[in-house]
Structure formats: structure tokens, C-alpha cells
Amino acid sequence: MSVMEMSHRGKHFTRIYQETVADLRELLSVPDDFAILFMQGGGSGQNALVPLNLIARKPARKADYILSGHWSNKSYKEAQRYGDIAIAASSGDEIVVDGARQDPWTWYPTPDLWRVRPDASYLHLCSNETIGGLEFADWPEMRELGAPDVPLVVDASSHILSRPIDFSKASVIYAGAQKNAGIAGVTMVFVRKDLLGHALPECPSVLNYQPVAENDSMFNTPPTYAIYIAGLVFKWIKAHGGIAAMEELNCRKAELLYSYLDSSKLYVSRVHPASRSRMNVPFFLRDETLNAEFLAQSEAANLLQLKGHKAVGGMRASIYNAMPLEGVEALISFLQDFERRHG
Ligand SMILES: *Cc1c(COP(=O)(O)O)cnc(C)c1O
């Protein structure tokens, strides 16, 4: 019998579920005061569920957002319908960093630039901008920002399980499974337990963190097969040395690729070095008339899905946990070969 046929309340699936949660808790050292929820609706669903569950924590119904690219902008827009939503910081402007001009959405606003309202119900951050290729994992203490009672909410969809998470800094962390934890259909949500129980009355029960937490994600039928696959991925990560080993490998992969791009005369990475993502590496050919030829030849060499998102253009290599070092080496040797022929 396959997992797809089993009752989610039967003893077989219950065991799969419990092991999956325990492995995830162990891998990320999730403290006991955090509930782990498996929900549906994806990372995008959380853009609505975060305000639905948290904005009424304080009567002013305010929430602040850090805008750093495509995904944080989507979160910010979705939240608008639930309260008084403000921008705490944005990298949507061109600025000069370290004496060099930095394009919009190619840098992360550092915490010294954040303006957080102390009566906001939460502050939202996307810690890895998948499309722009930016990562920000050194989260500040909200106390240091003069907002001790503003919990930090983080969309970590595209770098969860690639590095440790500091649960002393963030209060809610969410991530769709499909980038580093398996197949689409399930979203992991880590919620500090004291934040449960503040949902707006119109929040559907199946999407309300509190009943979902109280029922071990089985308030209704959870996406059992996606949970089963995530459980297998967690076991794979454990067998390969856990999060520390993932992080070490991801650093090696990213360093190899960025250092080649920086040494090249044909390709360029436009993201500020301090904000470069280990997971998503956008790059451009300085001569963009070569784009079509580059994509045709890379595909012929079995290097697939290198075309950048239409919002950014150029190329993008997504090198999630599942991409081995050999895959990055193969990409670099193709890039070198193409440069030799066109440089
Ligand atoms: C992919 C992604 C999402 C969207 O996930 P869905 O499951 O498609 O809703 C949200 N945030 C980030 C940072 C992502 O990379």
C-alpha cells in the first residue's frame, strides 16, 4: 500500500509524520517553544496567512516590510488588504555602496537602515530573494532596533535547510518545500508558540496557525505524500552530515561559481558581494546578443534551466542542496569553454 492510499490518521502515516517532524526539529535545532506546522498554499499562501494570523496581535493592526526584491514585494502587496502596512526599508533605489553604484534590487538593506514601528504587529523579511539572487541571514535582535515586541517573520522558502537558522532572532519562519525539502504541496511553518491565537475572526480554520498546531497539522487531511517525501529528504540530509555539511558544500559551490564569474571578462554578477545568495546565482553576458546562443549551447551540453527570470533577464544558476559540486564544476567548465570561443 502506498502512502497515497493510507489514512492520515492511521498508525503507519502517524509514524511517518512523527519521524518527519522529529527529524526536521533535530536538523534545524528548532527550540521547544516553536510549533512546526505543515500547511498548504505554498510560500505565497503565507503572504496572506501571516497577516491573517498575526496582524491583530496589536490593536493598531500595523505591519512593516523589508523590500529586497520580487518575493518580498509580493508579500508586501498581499498584506495590504489586512491592515496598515508600511515599508521599513527598501533596496528599490539605486545607491552608492563602498563608493560604487549599486542597481536597485541588487543589495540588501542592512538593519541600520530599517525603520520599524514599535507598535507594529510584526516585521517581515524575505531572507533569500530567489529571483534577484540575494541572501541575508545575519538577522538583528529586534531589541537593538528599538522594537523589542515586534516579532521578525521570515520567508526562507529558497534557502531553508541550506544553512543553520537562528531561532533566537526570528519568531515565524516559513518555507515552501519545493526548493530544498522535496516536492510542491506542503509548506513548513515554524511559529513561536506565544504568537498562536491571534488570528483575525475571518481567517479560515484550516489556515489558522492555532488549530493547525493543536492538531499536529491534522486539523484536516494534510498533503501526506509531500510530507512523506520531505521526510525522506530530511533523512538524506541527516545521512549526508546534517545542516553543517549542507552549508559547507553550499559555500564551496557558491564560492567556486562566483569566483569564476568575477574573474571572467564575458560574464558579470551584479549583486553586491555582501548580499550574494548561495542558492541562486544570476549572471549576465556582457554582450547580451550572445544570450540565445549561450542558452542553446548550454542546453545541448545538458545544463538546463539557466535562463534568468523575465523580471531580471540574463542567466540564473539555482544550486540548491540537491545540486552536487560536480554540477557546478560542469557549469563552470561550460562557461570557460564558451568564453574561450567568444571572449
Ligand atoms: C518560490 C518562492 C515562493 C513561492 O512559493 P509558492 O509555493 O509557489 O507559493 C515564495 N517565496 C520565495 C522566497 C520563493 O522562493
Image: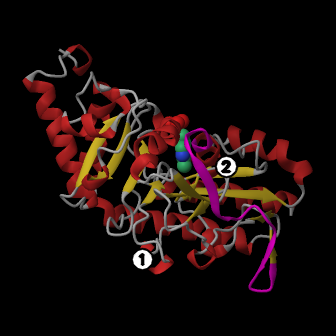
The verdict on residue 244 being magenta is: no
Q: What residue is shown with label 2?
A: 70
Mark 2: give few (<14), some (14-19) or many (20+) Cα within 10 Å.
Answer: some
Q: Nearer the viewer, residue 286 or 143?
A: 143
Tell me the tag on residue 143. Answer: 1
The residue positioned 86% from the left and 58% from the top of the image is: 342
Q: Would residue 241 be seen by someone viewing this image from the given angle?
A: no
The reply to whether residue 200 is in sight is: yes
Sequence-earlier tag: 1 or 2: 2
Taking the view exactly as shown, the residue that stands out farthest to the left is 11
Vertical placement of residue 63 versus 219, above or below: below
Distance of label 1 from label 2 (alpha carbons): 28 Å
Among the 4 quarters of the image, the one containing residue 90 = bottom right
Helix, strand or loop status at disc 1: helix
**Left or right: 286 as drawn, with respect to 328:** right
301 to 10, vertically: above or below: below
In the rendered structure, which segment of residues is drawn in magenta? Answer: 79-100
Q: Amino acid at mark 2?
A: His
Q: Nearer the viewer, residue 312 or 342?
A: 312
Quarter of the figure that contains the N terminus: top left
Left or right side of 332 for 182? left
Q: How many dots with numbers?
A: 2
The answer to whether residue 80 is magenta is yes
Q: Residue furthest bottom?
A: 99
